[in-house]
Amino acid sequence: MKVLVVLAACVLVCSAAAVDDAEREKAKQIKQQCKQEAGATDADVSELKDKDELTSPAAKKMMACVFTKNKIMQNNKFSKEGSMEVARKLMAGRPGSEAKLKIAEQIAENCNKEIGSVEASGDEMAKLIFDCLKKQAKEYLTAMNFVPREKV
């Protein structure tokens, strides 16, 4: 799912890389658990997926849960270390992983500078993290002349 692509800074940059079945299943389970915990509906998830934005309170709460369970958000703060832990796990053994991890690290560093010291509630911090990772990844993709596939 597009939403889960944001789980790590590098995943947006490395969207062409396939995640192995075990990681994909784990991500799916976390998403479902967080959807239930947040009280998010299928419509909330569809809106999040289609718009690629956190707009509804349920979507923000769901992403706060996803980010927390993946250690990308710890104590209502962005965790550069947590995001890199996820990136390393997702990139392990992949072709070009070293270069992709360097990009992921730069994205995480940029987000850490931008929002690392911001005080916000969990739901609002999730939105800040989501928006920062998305913006940073888009800038790197643009710089790399990456043209994403159209939605089918």
Image (tube, rainbow, N blue to C red):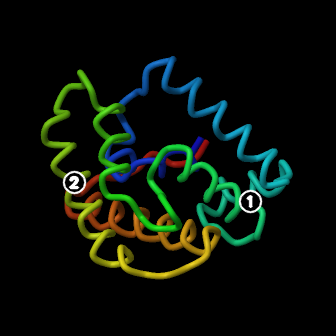
The residue furthest top is 21
Q: Quadrant of residue 111?
A: bottom left
Quarter of the figure with residue 127: bottom right
Using the image, determine if residue 107 lies above or below residue 128. above
Q: Is residue 133 left or right of residue 91?
A: right
Q: Position of residue 115 (x, y in %)?
A: 38, 76
Please rate how many residues cluster around mark 2, counting C-alpha atoms within 10 Å: few if below 14, some from 14 to 19, many from 20.
many
Per the image, the residue denoted by label 2 is 105
Q: Is residue 84 left or right of residue 77?
A: left
- Nearer the viewer's eye, disc 1 or disc 2? 2
Image point (48%, 58%), residue name:
73
3D distance between C-alphas at marks 1 and 2: 29 Å
Q: Which residue is mark 1?
A: 47
Hey, what amino acid is under mark 1? Answer: Glu
Pick the residue in front: 118 or 46: 118
Q: Measured from the top left, where is residue 47 in percent x and y?
A: 74, 59
Residue at point 49% right, 25% down? 23
Q: Is residue 54 above or below residue 148?
A: below
The local secondary structure at tag 2 comes to helix
Amino acid at circle 2: Glu
70 to 133, vertically: above or below:
above
Q: 70 or 132, which is in the foreground?
A: 70
Identify the residue shown where x is 27% and y is 61%.
107
Relative image position of residue 59 (x, y in whole percent): 71, 61
Name which quarter of the figure residue 86 lies in.
top left
